[in-house]
Every structure is written in structure tokens, then in C-alpha cells.
Amino acid sequence: MSRVLTRCRGEISRRHTVSAISSNSNFQHRSIIGAGPKPGYIVLLPEMPPDDPETNALVDVKKNPQFETLTKNNYVNAVGKLALEMESRIWTIEDKLKDAQYPRTYENVLEPLETTSATFDYVWGVLKTLNLVKNDYFPSEGYNRIHDRARQARSKKYTSLPIYFACKEMKVDSQKLNEPQQRVLDKFLLEGSLSGVELTGNAAVHLGQVLQKLTEERTKFRRNVDESTNGFKHLIVEPKYVGDMPTHLLKHLAKDKSQPNKAPWIVRLSSPTYKAFMEYCPEPGIRWNAWNAYNTRASGYSDKSINNSIHIEEIRSKRQEQAQLLGFENYVDLSMQTKMAGTEDNVQTMISTLFSHAQPKQVEEFEELKSFAGSRGFEGILRPWDLDFWRRRQRSALFNVDDDAVSEFFPFPEVWKNLCAFAEDIFSIQTKRADIQVWNEDVAYYEIFDKKSNLKLGGFYLDPYSRPKQKLSKGSWMLGNKTLCGVPEMSPLATLVFNFLPPMYGKPSLLSFDDMNALFGKFGQVLQHLLTTVPYHEVSGTNNIEWDAIFVAQKFMTMWLGNKAVVKEMSCHYENGSKLSDDIIQNVLRSRKHMAATDLCHELYLSALDIDLYKKKEFWMDIMKNLWPVYHAPLQLDKRDSHVCTMVDIFSGDFAAAYYCKLWSQMLAADAYQQFVEKGQGRDAWRNHGQRFRESFFAMGGGYHPNKIFRQFRGRDPSLTPILWTLGLKPMTIVEVDPVSKPEEATQPPEVVKVTN
């Protein structure tokens, strides 16, 4: 049942219903605005859902969700109600901006959006969290409709012409704003500009068509990858082929998970099981079969109906059109608008400098691997499907590390307790568990307090164990649910989700080093989201951080797993409580750097490949064939290798012309971490630097440019020396501090410091 609201307006006629969902709605909206004056204004709205804190606890942002009592209708109604409220607020602002005398100020234009945006994003975030951890609750079709409606509503504030032009007027006098407010203003301007809000006529229509086609092609690309990945399985019935495999891998492969040592075992292409299988399978023919299936997925060598080659070229072409319509030479230049690096030249400097140091070592590593394999009876040329197996054998021979035995020293409950204690000590916080409603008995809720003032800073949920029928079966996530913002009594809230093996057979969940890497990294992101001091929703916590700096907190925390003292501190044997010995820790850490140059060269290859694919016009396969030998000189590219056809991050995901971002973040994190450990500093120095890290990277988040944050912490621009040191490719070298004269004004892309000779 709808009610009709009629008001006299001189420009725009709109019709809106809550169920009107279109993947291209943003551009239809802009084309309406650009169509010229209309005589009246009619809004068709459905009845506002009667939800309030009394009838729907989800809309009470002062409290955490009451998961045990919330119904599906509560979620649907809350998203619908708050979407309408946010759109109504936008229309109200647009109404006022029709008056040329209405002051174009932050308080009049952007501040009114703070409350509605923060509240809406919270409710939408809870729904996304629930879909991740309890995805049997909503049918995917129903969830996708709500999700699309939410995205449509959220985008309107950035694509409103009146708000955009008001922001342009504010920019002229923006020095009156504080720095986080300027970042909010710049965010609205950049989001509007990159969505084509200023385009009119045919250009606006063309951009809408391009983006619609891009959405279709990206969806097809991902669907083809999923179908080809899920379509393969190889059955193993001979125990001799799995005899050396660790227990955790056998549990993944066994048809009967309760009897991992019993045949049959099923090999699939999902990550990380595929890579682990390639490391342990002794039979070259079986390895080739799995490798071939994995590297020809969605290509011309597999099912032609799911070949991604044409979709790659369509996506590249449409992104080039998108960039040119928005005034950029190519998509790489467009991508750099949201990056700390700022220019492709800065990215290329990082790639070329790191490669110049890694490439000679890569050749050495490959020759040593060939020699080792030959000494163990291998004959012929090492092929791609041989590398993981012989690398694992060589690593085991060099360092004698038993992964299963090591994991016994890292039971999840003890590691979690020790990680919290470490963070409390270094960052001057307290972590306390609280008893509130959660969605599963294994989920815990914690609150973080400032150690000195005892002020509550925020809270987070921890969902540690896999639940194959409810949770996504792989990966780990940090979801920011609430931010520090202008909403009274609303404090930051986040969710940590992992897929660690649950306790079984009388044993607690035992973590591998990869598991601990995920735990430390995501906990770093939680700290950044909760310890923010920026009180503006749009730029608070992890919001609005440049893409190539968004992983700094995550990478920084994982750096501590390269520290012998911290690894020992985390260890506690699940049976007797003993600590891991110094010798074993040393071997574990050395083994983690095994063939680091080879791995770095491959990451540099993928970063360079991504940029070339969005800058050059040649066919994707030609670009791949040209770049491969540059970065993988010792290893020939197999003629069937079509790995580009499954690069989901750059074709279906959000990292087009941005694959380098994690490496850039790792560079910054390594530099920050070295500040803690250079000159043999101890725990007192860690606390001092930890407080400074909290006051910069954690506190400032998206409210300040990452260049300024880094310079505030380090006193200079980033150096490439520390990342090479953390990878074991170069001794630690202390880079001399050369502070910029006014770091608070430094907003230009940094000059990457040359590696010290």
C-alpha cells in the first residue's frame, strides 16, 4: 500500500519505490537529473515499516544485535526502513540546496548525512555478517535482493548532483575544516567524480551502458571460475600416494572426514587444499593432472562454454572506455586516484627495485632446488607441477620442521589468550569478554578498553571455527559493523570470522602457522577499526583508507610472527603446557623464508601483469607470455598455462590495476615493524613504539592521508629496505631519518626511498 506525496519543484520528477532495484540505477538517476526541468515533483513511497527500537531491536544502534530474538522480517524491514530514511534525508538536503542563498557548509550538507549513513551501514553490516556466518538463514536470492537494494540506497549520497556541486563550492574554502572533515569532503568529491556524476547527455548514457556491461562480464567471469573449479575431482584409493600427508590435509581430502586415514581421498581445486596436495603428492602423473586442471580452468583448454578469454578482453575494453569517459588515459591512471602511491611511476619503482634485489637470488634458489631434487633421484627438467613438491622436500631436509608437531604447541584458546595479552601490553589496552547474545555457541564477544582511562573503545565478535553447512568454507574476514561517529552512544563494533578446524577427538583446535598468520592479521584490522579517534563515519576506522594502505595494520601484526620472542610467547603445548624450543622456533622461522626470492618475484610478476593488462592493448595471452620470462627466468611457461583466466581479484573483484596493493602495504608494515626491533630494542621500547603506532596507524585510520600517518610514525618516507630484510633477502639496515619539514602538510605521493646499498 503506497501513499503519494506531492510537492512543487521546479526541476526534477522522480518516482521511487522500495522494491525498484536496478543494477544500473545510479546512472538512470543521473540521466534523469540531466534531462532538464520538470514541472512537478511526485514521490511514490511504500508505507514506512513501523519498526522502532521497541518492535525491532536491530534499529537500536545503541545496543548490539539481539540475535536470538531477531526474525527475518526484522532484517528486511530494518534495511528497507533505513534505506528510505537515508534517501529521504538526501532529498531534503537537495531541496534546501535549490535555494541559492542556502549556505553550502559542512554542517548543512554533509553533517546531516552522518547519522543516517552510520545507522544504515550498521544494519546492512549486520546482515552481511549474518550471511557470512549463517548463510543458511537467508536464501541467496532473497539476500541478494536486499543487498542490491542497500547498495543502491548507499550510493545515492555520492551521485547526487546538488550535493556534489555543493561539495565543490565547499572545497574552495575547505581550509576552515579540520583534516578528517576535509577527507570526508574529498571522499564525496572523488566518489562523485569517479561515478561520472558530471557527465551529461550521450556521455552519461554511454558510461551507464559500459558499467552495466562490466557488471555482466565480471559476473560471468567469476561464475566460470567457480564452475571450472568445482567441476574437478580426482579420486585416490592407493594409500602410498597420501602416506606423507599431514593429518590436517588428510581431513580435508578424506571422503569420510571422521576417518582421515581411510580411502578414498578426493582431490579438488579449492584453495588452500590444492596447494597442500601439490606439496605432498609423490606421484608426478597425479600432480600433473591436478596442476593441469588448476591452471587451465575457465580457459580454451577446458570446457569451451566456460572459457574466460573473451570475458577478459571485454572487461579490459570496457574499463578502458570507462577511464576515457572519465578523463583518464587508461584504467591504471583511474585506479591511482584511490591509492597512496598516487602514480604508476611510484608503483613501477617499487616493482623494479624489489625485483633487482630478488632476481639474482631467485636464480640461486632454483639452481639449489634442481641440485637437491637431483640428489634425491629426480631426473629431467623441473616442471611447474614439480616445484611445490620438491620445495617442500627441500624445506623439510634443510629445517626438519614437522608441521603437525609444531601445531600442537599452538592450541587456539592459548594462542588467543596470549595474543590478547601481547596487544594489551604493547598498545596499552584491555580486552574483556562479555556475555551477550551471539549466533552460535562457539562465538564469543569481547570489549576493548583503554588501559589508563578504562574508557570503552569498542567491541568485537569472534567466530573461530569452521561450520561447513553455515559459513563460507574458506578464508577469514574482519567486518566493521559500527564506527566511531556522530551518533550518540554508538561505539565501534566489528566481527572476526575464521575457519579453523574445530576441537575434535579430545584435542583443542590446533593452529598451523598459516592459521596464526590469519589470526594476527585480522586482529590487526580489528584494532585499527576499534581504536580509531576519528569521529566521522565516512572516514572512521578502516573506512576510506587508500587501497594500497588498507592492509598495513594486518601486515604489521603478522610481522610479529617472525619474532622469536613473540612466537615463544604464543606457544603452549596442548597437553603439557611446554613452550616451543628456541631451536625449533629458529628452524620454523627460517623455513617460512625458504625460496622467498622466488615467491617475491612471482608477486612482482602478478603486479606488473595486472598493470600491463589495463594499460596495453595487446591480447592478454601475449602480455602474459612476454612478462613471464622476465620474472621467472629459471622456469619456462607451460604452453597450456592459462592462469590469467582465473585472476578473479583483477577481473571480477575490486583490485583491477591494484594487485600491487598488498605488496605496497607489506612494504609500509615492514618499515613500521623495523622501528620496533632495530638496535636490539626490548619490551619497554616496544611499548613506547606501540603507543605511537596506536596514535598514528590505529587512531588516524581513514581520517588522514596515509602519507601523513606514515611520516608521523617513521619521520620519513617509506623505504624498501625493511621488506627485503623481513624476507631474509637483505641484512637489516637502519635507514636514516630525514623528516619532512611539515609532515602535517605532506599529502603528495611519497618518493619511495631507494634501497640502501
Image (cartoon, rainbow, N blue to C red):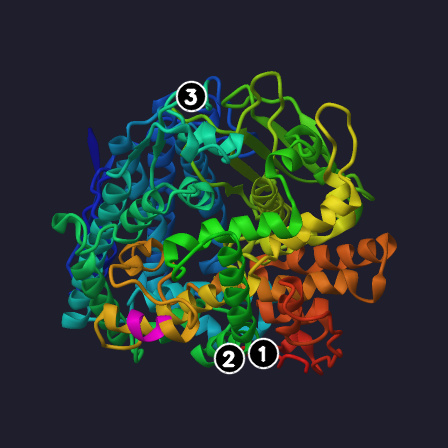
Residue under circle 3? 262
Kindly identify which numbered label has been placed on residue 752: 1
Q: Disc 2 designates what residue? A: 349
Asked where in the image residue 29 lies, by quadrant, the reply is bottom left
Q: Nearer the viewer, mark 2 or mark 1?
A: 2
* Figure disc tally: 3
Q: Could you tell whether 72 is left or right of 113 in the image?
A: left
Q: Main secondary structure of the magenta part?
A: helix
Q: Earlier in the sequence, mark 1 or mark 3?
A: 3
In percent of width and height, residue 670 lies at 65, 63
**Mark 2 touches mark 1? (CB < 8 Å):** yes
Say which amino acid is labelled 1. Answer: Val
Q: Is residue 520 above or below residue 215?
A: above
Quarter in which the C terminus is drawn: bottom right
Q: Nearer the viewer, residue 143 or 522?
A: 522
Above or below — where is 13 with respect to 244?
below
**Image coords of residue 119 (percent x, y):** 47, 41
Q: Nearer the viewer, residue 105 or 423?
A: 423
| Res 721 seen here | yes
Dot 1: few (<14), some (14–19), or many (≥20) neighbours within 10 Å?
some
The mark lying in front, picked from 3 and 2, is 3
- Of residues 249 and 614, the one nearer the viewer is 249
Q: Is residue 93 visible?
A: no
Q: Position of residue 89 (x, y in %)?
A: 38, 48
Q: Which residues are magenta?
A: 624-628
